Image (cartoon, helix red, strand yellow):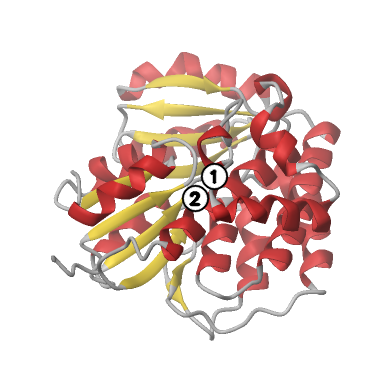
Amino acid sequence: MNQVPVGLVFPGQGTQKQGMGEPWRDAPSWELTAEVSAVTGEDLSELLLHTPGEHLRRTDLAQLAVFTLSLIAHAEAVRGDAFTGPVVACAGHSLGEYTALVAAGALTVGQGAALVAARGRAMREAALAREGTMGAVVAAPLAAVEELVREMREGGGEVWVANVNAPGQTVVSGSPETIGELAERAPSIGGKLIRLRVGGAFHSPYMAPAAEALRDALRKMSFAPTRQPVVSNVDATPYTGDGDWPAHCVRQLTSPVLWEQSVRTLTGSLGCRRLVELGPGRALAGMIRRIDSDVEVISVDAPATLLTLAVGQR
């Protein structure tokens, strides 16, 4: 059996969809829904099985749903000893960073659920208080997007780079007016802006009130040393027990998610030759293949896909 070093990656908000828990409902690890429900006061079984997709888009509910389903997928992979190679690192995209911290042992399931619930509420409240939106600029180089964003801010616009996802895919965040103007100007840098159906201008200064609320929740938490390093969104650096995770979590709300750089850390200095995406959808796998076409990527979004881990699947 090929014992390649494995990195685990966890998706963020936006990957949720109605009924996404159905394939997992008979899995032993489905019991995690009860644990998360008890901590958060939300019925996770209902969210994962029956909640309409439009309602599931609500920021706080979407984050809890994706977090819980990703934990179930991870728990089932661990229970079945499915990774075949040594797990050497973890990372998550935005919300997924909290799942990564639980998977790596820095947080318990209950702690992670409490933080995700507090984070989701705070982000929703901040978004309701100040209208914002996001868009994905595709095809244009990152440097050109950064320059355009800088130019627009100097002209009085409110827009920031929010996610550096992959070559040719940069997400921007800001006021609806400025994002609309950027959509008109994107062709001038060889790009096109695709509007995202989100509830606010996430990973931008618009989330400063949410960062303060999250800081209060983090004061009640203690982070344990991790079993494997977790690559931080805010600086693409791997941290273990010496990482100031409360500071990273607060900073993440108003800073760009450096996903492309994080994947290069996983496949570079950390030596991961197989990345396993655990949770709903396959968005991260698509990004990863654009970042590093040489790394093996496997998505586990249903119990049946656990079987692909035994032999590997490009």
- In this rendering, the answer to whether 29 lies above or below 136 is below
Question: Rounded to the nearest whole Å, what is the CA distance between mark 2 and mark 1?
Answer: 5 Å
Classify residue 223 as left or right of residue 210.
Answer: left
Q: Secondary structure at mark 2?
A: loop
Q: Tell me which residue sits at (48%, 13%) in the image.
A: 184
- In this rendering, the answer to whether 197 lies above or below 214 is above
2 or 1: tag closer to the N-terminus:
1
Which quadrant, please, contains the C terminus? top left
Q: Residues within 10 Å of mark 2 (few under 14, many from 20)?
A: many
Residue 101 disc label: none
Q: Secondary structure at mark 1?
A: loop
Residue of label 2 = 93
Please name the amino acid that badge 1 sits on.
Gly
Which quadrant, please, contains the N terminus? bottom left
Please name the amino acid that badge 2 sits on.
His
Q: Are marks 2 and 1 in contact (CB under 8 Å)?
A: yes
Kindly indicate the quadrant of the structure image that contains residue 140: top left
Kindly indicate the quadrant of the structure image that contains residue 263: bottom left
Residue 12 disc label: 1
Whole-percent x and y of residue 19?
A: 60, 28
Q: Tell me which residue sits at (48%, 80%) in the image.
A: 240
